[in-house]
Amino acid sequence: MTNEQSKSQKTPLYNDHLALKARLVDFAGWVMPIQYEGLKEEHIWTRKHVGLFDVSHMGEIRVKGPKAAETLQWLTTNDVAVLENGQAQYSLLPNNQGGLVDDIFIYCLEKNSDYLVCVNASNKDKDFLWMIKNNKGADITDESSLWGQIAIQGPEALKLCDQIFAPVKVSEMPRNQIKISTFKKNQISYQIMIATTGYTGENGCEIFIQAAGASELWNALLNSPDIKAKPVGLGARDTLRTEMKYSLYGHEIDDATNPYEAGLGWAIKPAAKNFLNKEQILKAKELGLKRKLIGFKMLDRGIPRQAYELKTETGEKIGVVTSGTHSPTLDEPIGIAYVDSAFSTEASQFFVDIRGKLVKAHVVKTPFVKKD
Amino acid sequence: MAFHIPEDFYYTKDHEWAQVDENIVTVGVTEFAQDQLGEVVYVDLPEEGQKVTQNQTFGVVESVKAVSDLFAPVSGTVIEVNSALMDDPSKLNDDPNNEGWLVRIEMDSEKELASLMRAPEYKKLISEK
């Protein structure tokens, strides 16, 4: 461990990562596993079987009290009023300049009065201050240090969860639900929340667990007698979400992104409610979107990477890559980019400037990897 | 992890190796480098006849997650390129010291070798990582 890493926070699973000989990196102020046995193996294992992800670095902000729903309606773009007890919703926190503070998941624990908001690790402090500053009278607390979080993702994830969390039948929970339960080990009962959400496109869930129980749960999941779950690092987490064209803050979206350009209009409900800076966000859409977020593949050799420019044959800049990698599932390069609307329809061709060389590419349908 | 670091190679601080045969220098990346890179999925190498300069980039290798520059251990002219790597970059992971070689360079001046490391020094460098 270098000194630099030792300043970073450790998740409740830090010692488990050491025992598994993970390669550790500093990410958003946390010491996190980038990979264990290898990115590609972990990625493929998640697509075919089940992967375990330590996502304890994610932030958890609790919004409670009689003004909780009203506050979240104001702070977020999606319609909180439709959430019943135990339902979850993807949403956005708009800033006051037409961009986004973060993208988030809201879990309704008690309609109108108790919500859990899961936020990106890199934005947690910023989000919390923003929510406090624009609070409409809710009781907002940062619970991040109380919770460990483990994502269980893949075709065998729900079967594994049914085993570990019995009598809860996780396989019978619809997607985007949350259920409060307990996980018992060695006569100790830990509070958990089972959420059927995820960031891979696979079936599965994300478990919030009292930090003290996270390691016990992680090892119970790893040591199932008949289902072989493997630990998966942040490297494969990124390639899995890229294959689904899921946005990642700092890549596809940031404090200057209009969410309609990012293809996130489905998480904005302007007809249902008023929200912070609604007018500016809608105005950009009404004026016509200048650029769109698209998925593309290469027609000649080369791997696109974030910040590479998209150009016309004559070298005119028409876009920029937000994420790019070699897809482990497809075994070919894939990319996500903002491109001028004129070049955004399927099969439109352009060039990616890869270290000064223009390499041909074209727009494709997304997600890159189809899931049912 | 124990890496095989051949005694007769020269090494750069950027983890390339150089095997010298009179004025012809074969260049590759070390076992340590391939382990750090993870699975290599793309290799971009110069063409034959291209001039390279010591400590300057002459190509890239890419894993799923990252792009890494390749640095020339000596200045000179590229006389041969391992084109098999372009089709099957996994050779770079499987056998970095032999089959995974990158280019052969006709070096301008063997005086440049003096600034490279020998095996004991390189082993010390990676043991501190």
Image (cartoon, coloured by chain):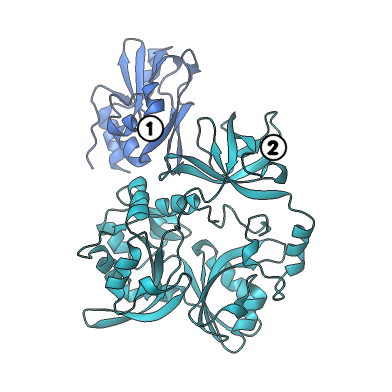
Chain colours: A cyan, B blue
Please rate how many residues cluster around mark 1, counting C-alpha atoms within 10 Å: few if below 14, some from 14 to 19, many from 20. Answer: some
Residue farthest along the bottom direction in this orientation: A66
Q: In this view, does A53 lie above or below B84?
A: below
Percent from the top left, x then y, of residue A355?
56, 32
Disc 2: host chain? A
Q: Determine which residue is flagged by label 2.
A: A317
Q: Name the secondary structure under disc 2.
A: strand
**Residue B82 has which mark?**
none
Identify which residue, A3 or B46, lies in the foreground: B46
**Residue displayed at 36% across by 46% down:** A40
- Quarter occupied by residue A214: bottom left
Q: How many marks?
A: 2
Percent from the top left, x then y, of residue B101?
34, 24
**Residue displayed at 59% across by 32% down:** A360
Residue farthest along the right direction in this orientation: A287
Quadrant of the image for the C terminus of chain A?
Answer: bottom left
Q: Are marks 1 and 2 in contact (CB under 8 Å)?
A: no
Percent from the top left, x then y, of residue A295?
57, 46
- In the rendered structure, the answer to whether residue A117 lies left or right of residue A180 reads right
- In the rendered structure, the answer to whether residue B72 lies left or right of residue A219 reads right
Q: Determine which residue is flagged by label 1.
A: B13
Q: Which amino acid does label 2 sit on?
A: Lys
Q: Which amino acid does label 1 sit on?
A: Lys
- In the rendered structure, the answer to whether residue B82 lies left or right of residue A245 reads left
